[in-house]
Amino acid sequence: MLRAYLLLCISLFTLPVIAATEIRSNEVWLLVDTKAKKIEVKKGEQTVETLEHVAIGRGGAGLKSHRGDNITPHGEYHIGWIGDKSMFRRFFGLTYPSVDDAEKAFEKNIINEGQYKRIVRAHELGQIPPQDTPLGGQIGIHGLGSADARVHAVFDWTHGCIALTNSQIDHLSQLVDTGTLVKIK
């Protein structure tokens, strides 16, 4: 009972932070379709480009339950940082875990109250959420680097990220920046 009350109080406190993201008509954002294995580059609600044949986590996509589950999380995130010197060529780090991810994990006793509050606080301050909780971190969109393109074409091989070919990630880097909205479904 106390846990439910605490979650309600924290949720009410963070309500403005977790409100639905408004998309402006001229704003570029990404829709990752984990079933169709594609990324739609959108401007407002219009698809302006599609990147086909992406790879996702070996465990599929859905609700991540812990670090190392190899699941690509569903949800709304932003590009929090860009690594141009990644072993995967480029890495667009996502603001995972979200407040929604944290709420679900807190309700299921996957993370504790302190970890929950750290995640919420980071989002309130516009910072990258902690990457060291039991939910894991370092989820992003990246290229292949020196990985085998033939494996990429037929196998979901990541630990929870979304992978593109090197040419696709180079092209995408011209369209997005930190702060770009990424919806994963």
Image (spheres, rainbow, N blue to C red):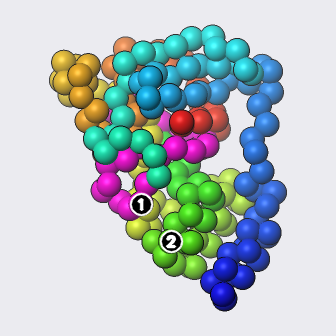
The magenta stretch spans residue 84: yes
Residue 116 sits in quarter: bottom right
Residue 80 visible? The answer is no
Q: Residue most toward the bottom?
A: 2
Residue 177 on image: x %, y %:
59, 30
Residue 150 on image: x %, y %:
19, 18
Residue 99 sits in quarter: bottom right
Q: Is there a contact, CB below 8 Å, between mark 1 and mark 2?
A: yes
The answer to whether 17 is drawn above or below residue 72 in the figure is below
Residue 180 on image: x %, y %:
63, 33
Residue at x 72%, y 82% (from the top left corner): 5
Residue at x 58%, y 28% (from the top left corner): 31
Q: What amino acid type should be assigned to the residue bearing mark 2?
A: Lys
Kindly identify which residue carries mark 1: 65
Residue at x 31%, y 45% (from the top left corner): 59
Magenta stretch, residue numbers: 64-92
Label 2, residues with CA under 10 Å away: few <14, some 14-19, many ≥20: few
Q: Residue most toward the top?
A: 48
The answer to whether 112 is drawn above or below residue 162 in the figure is below
If you read the primary sequence from the N terminus, does the residue marked by circle 1 or circle 2 appear first? 1
Helix, strand or loop status at disc 1: loop
The answer to whether 107 is drawn above or below residue 93 in the figure is below
The magenta stretch spans residue 182: no
